[in-house]
């Protein structure tokens, strides 16, 4: 049994400090929860803790390189440099070549498969290193193979799995690494990895649902723009001479389309340059800190789509919070990771404000209730969860509720958007075509009369 020093909050939000005996840090956290205490930070008697000050996961120390491989690498680099100089390459060229080497990465689907298979192998009794070797051999993509090989190399050098994953930031985010670190401390790596696989799979499914809902209107608008441009630049101008030879007054729609076609043909570079320049400027502004916040706020308030964006943000917040809390990550570290992975700057701001409030001894539900992003149902359920000690269970129910809401809204939006886009396409393209045929129909009518 080990002695742990903890800093927690009771059901009334008051800070409580003390000591507790447990075999592992995860068991200590579980005992605190049985007493209706929410751990803020916890450390072992010697002062070392899975979580740093304020509950934030501590950065892992880099693994020490073995002298022999380092010497071999240095000699190899020297030999390569000498060979490069013989072939006329400068040393800086060799450095540039080394910088362009591929970095370990993994797609969402690859990460789900990797996590679930690693959990199964560890649960079956295979060592972590053996499991990574097997996964590297059967990897279907070079990036996933490189990721497994990098992790195995770091483990052979003496690193923990969580520290090894920090060398692959394109494959594993902060949430993933924090949960793996919690699994290492609790000795329940297979259980934590199974939860991780479920989380990544559900989050990826929600992302694909939203992406599929947005893909159809974007493709439809691009097609409308392309067809209209073709008609205005290639078809309409050929009818001008025909219309001018007719001794008749052209309809207003025909005049407007012909004038627009003439202007577009004379200024097509400026028109398309302005269009693409505007799109580029919008994307560039969105990547700035201020632009990202403005766009995220607009995304939560636009008609129809704003409700869906809000539900997606709440589902992601609840799912991430529940998964981390259930895995034994203290609340301060959880709030750091939730803020980092929120996907919306407005939600991130609300979570960071709540983090400071919790640090000062307040309950989590109090600052969240002041944010317009979180509806009363969510904050009240969080408040009940804090008082009853079942916060992760209620958060999971919130996540399931909003996941179902998003999927239902995507189906209704798809059925609504499709006829609207078809009508818009018919009005634009049909208007151009009609403007061409109106004078012809008028002449035919006169001849028939």
Image (spheres, helix red, strand yellow):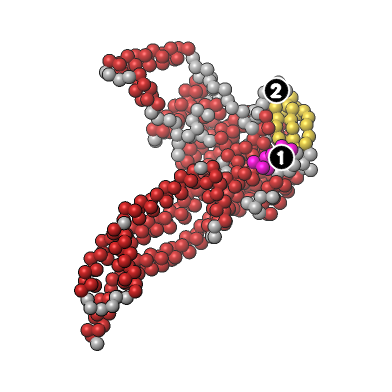
User: Does residue 55 appear to the left or right of 279 in the view shown?
Assistant: right
The foreground one among 323 and 376 is 376
Disc 1: which residue? 358
The label shown at residue 47 is: 2
User: For residue 64: magenta?
Assistant: no
Pinpoint residue 359: horizontal percent, then vertical percent: 71, 37
Q: Residue at the spot x=74%, y=38% of the render?
A: 360
Q: Residue at the spot x=78%, y=30% of the render?
A: 18
Q: Which residues are magenta?
A: 352-360
User: For residue 353: magenta?
Assistant: yes
The foreground one among 249 and 146 is 249
User: Does residue 47 appear to the left or right of 60 in the view shown?
Assistant: right
State if disc 1 and disc 2 touch (CB < 8 Å): no
Q: Residue at the spot x=46%, y=26% of the render?
A: 150
Pinpoint residue 210: horizontal percent, then vertical percent: 49, 52
Looking at the figure, which quarter contains the C terminus?
bottom left
Outermost residue, bottom side:
449
Per the picture, the main secondary structure of the magenta-coloured stretch is: helix
Mark 2 Cα-neighbour bin, 10 Å: few <14, some 14–19, many ≥20: few
Pinpoint residue 131: horizontal percent, then vertical percent: 49, 28
Pinpoint residue 15: horizontal percent, then vertical percent: 77, 36
Looking at the figure, which quarter contains the N terminus?
top right
Q: Quadrant of residue 250?
A: bottom left
Circle 1 SS class:
helix
| Picture layout, residue 209 above or below residue 84 | below
């Amino acid at each position: 049994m080990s002695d742990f020093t903890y800093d927690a909050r009771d059901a009334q939000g008051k800070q409580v400090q003390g000591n507790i005996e447990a075999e592992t840090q995860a068991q200590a956290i579980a005992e605190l929860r049985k007493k209706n205490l929410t751990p803020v930070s916890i450390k072992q008697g010697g002062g070392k803790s899975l979580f740093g000050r304020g509950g934030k996961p501590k950065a892992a120390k880099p693994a020490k390189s073995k002298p022999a491989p380092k010497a071999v690498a240095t000699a190899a680099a020297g030999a390569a440099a000498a060979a490069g100089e013989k072939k006329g390459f400068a040393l800086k060229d060799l450095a540039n070549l080394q910088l362009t080497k591929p970095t370990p990465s993994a797609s969402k689907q690859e990460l789900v498969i990797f996590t679930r298979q690693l959990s199964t192998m560890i649960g079956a009794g295979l060592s972590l290193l053996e499991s990574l070797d097997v996964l590297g051999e059967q990897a279907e993509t070079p990036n996933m193979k490189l990721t497994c090989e990098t992790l195995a190399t770091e483990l052979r050098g003496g690193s923990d799995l969580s520290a090894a994953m920090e060398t692959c930031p394109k494959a594993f985010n902060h949430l993933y690494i924090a949960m793996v670190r919690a699994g290492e401390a609790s000795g329940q790596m297979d259980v934590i990895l199974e939860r991780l696989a479920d989380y990544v799979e559900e989050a990826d499914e929600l992302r694909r649902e939203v992406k599929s809902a947005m893909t159809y209107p974007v493709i439809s608008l691009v097609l409308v723009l392309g067809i209209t441009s073709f008609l205005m630049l290639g078809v309409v101008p050929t009818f001008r001479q025909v219309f001018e030879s007719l001794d008749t007054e052209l309809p207003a729609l025909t005049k407007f389309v012909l004038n627009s076609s003439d202007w577009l043909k004379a200024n097509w570079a400026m028109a398309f340059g302005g269009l693409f320049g505007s799109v580029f400027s919008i994307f560039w502004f969105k990547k700035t800190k201020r632009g990202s916040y403005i766009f995220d706020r607009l995304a939560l308030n636009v008609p129809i789509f704003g409700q869906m964006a809000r539900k997606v943000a709440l589902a992601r917040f609840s799912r991430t919070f529940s998964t981390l809390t259930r895995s034994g990550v203290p609340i301060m570290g959880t709030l750091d990771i939730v803020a980092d992975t929120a996907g919306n700057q407005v939600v991130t701001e609300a979570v960071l404000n709540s983090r400071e409030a919790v640090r000062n001894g307040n309950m989590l539900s109090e600052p969240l209730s002041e944010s317009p992003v979180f509806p009363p149902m969510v904050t009240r359920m969080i408040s009940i969860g804090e008082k009853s000690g079942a916060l992760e269970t209620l958060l999971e129910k919130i996540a399931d509720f909003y996941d179902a809401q998003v999927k239902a809204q995507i189906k209704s939006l798809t059925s609504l958007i499709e006829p609207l886009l078809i009508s818009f396409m018919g009005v634009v393209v049909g208007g151009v075509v009609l403007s061409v045929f109106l004078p012809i129909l008028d002449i035919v009518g006169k001849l028939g009369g």
